[in-house]
Amino acid sequence: MANELLSVPVAAGTIFIAGGGLAAVCRKAKQTLTNEKLPLMGVLGAFVFAAQMVNFQLPLMPGTSGHMVGAVLLAIVLGPHAGAIVMSSIVIIQCLVFQDGGLLALGCNIINMALVPTYIGYYVFRLFSGDGLGRGGMYTGSIVACVVAMEAGALLVPIEAAVSGVLLVPFTTFLYTMLGVHLLVGLIEGVVTAFVLEYLRDVRPQILTGGLAGEGRMSTIAVYVTLLISALILGAGLSLVASSNPDGLEWSYKERPDQPQFRPAVGNDSQVVAAADRLQDRFAPMPDYSVRASEHAETEVGGDRTGGPWAGWTSFAGVFGSLLTMAVVWGIARMLRHRPASRVPA
């Protein structure tokens, strides 16, 4: 979500709620998080960050695109507490480093993309798949969980915008558009999530939350390496061929290339929101996954705030963001890991 979708009171309230939610999640994770899970959290964080950079054209909907969120995948593999921590770290890095998501909207984005989808997706998946992770149950559970989690996050956006008083269209119009677009995204993400889970189950079943019986065809370290290599390929390579169409949220309220007469569904004249936009625009190190041009270069290119159209910056941002996410997640997890009480010798 961008800042313009929120009023200042709603933004402040959701930041407070997200902070309290993350504190509760960290307390839960601290009771169960072990050293063995730290590397997996890091590489999966890098993988999801890179996967989110690959926007794909939505079928039957020209002019719009979608991308993975990854919250359900993280929850299934890591458990909901660890998954929520990794997903929240990704959202925060995207906002502060790459100006992807508004600064005032950070609380909403953590709630909508990390906390709510992670827990809803995890329990819906378990309900439909059971504990055995058979192929049929795994695909059914993944698709249903991703759809439900995606729709839950999509439902919250119109509610937050309506409470903020920024909608220029009826609430139901924005709501139905968001739910329809993200239904397609959830279906596609569910299939991708099932493929990743099937790969992990086949090569190292013990790596999944709770562990599964069976002999893995790869060592744990080898699985970590393949996930990291996949993240680098996604970030450095596939991000270059991602769809340039607006994603489902932007298409729903802001921009529709396939409909030239479309007018934005949101209006926000708050000076605080405008100031937050300027602050984020000025201090984000790599806005829009590119580099900031010098003042002279900005003048030469007509005010463009980035370093030009060289596609290599997107690849660099994908690799840098993936590695940064891995390092940040590993550091946070290391601080939160469970430390058994030391035994006092008799």
Image (cartoon, rainbow, N blue to C red):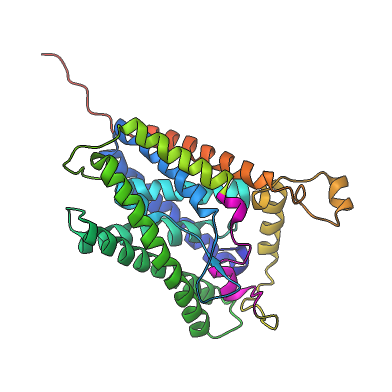
Q: Does the magenta stretch include residue 250?
A: yes
- Judge whether 319 appears above or below 189 on screen: above
Q: Which of 152 and 214 is in front in this view?
A: 214
Seen from this angle, which residue lies furthest top? 346
Relative to 161, is 197 on the left or the right? left
Relative to 166, is 124 on the left or the right? left
Residue at 41% x, 66% y: name it: 186
Relative to 257, is 142 on the left or the right? left
- Judge whether 75 appears above or below 61 on screen: above
- The tally of labels here is 0
Seen from this angle, which residue lies furthest left? 346
Query: How far from the left and from the top, in percent, is residue 245?
Result: 62, 66
Query: How far from the left and from the top, in percent, is residue 201?
Result: 26, 46
Residue 121 visible (yes or no): yes
Residue at 50% x, 60% y: name it: 67
Residue interval drawn in magenta: 238-258
Q: Is residue 141 magenta?
A: no
Residue at 54% x, 76% y: name it: 61
Q: Which of 338 and 225 is in front in this view?
A: 225
Residue 336 visible (yes or no): no
Choose top left, top right, bottom left or bottom right for residue 32. Answer: top left
Query: How far from the left and from the top, in percent, is residue 51?
Result: 49, 51
Quadrant (top left/top right/bottom left/bottom right) for the N terminus: bottom right
Relative to 97, is 185 on the left or the right? left
- Judge whether 38 appears above or below 3 on screen: above
Quadrant (top left/top right/bottom left/bottom right) for the C terminus: top left
Q: Nearer the viewer, residue 74 or 220?
A: 220
Choose top left, top right, bottom left or bottom right for residue 71. Answer: bottom left
Query: How far from the left and from the top, in percent, is residue 3?
Result: 61, 63
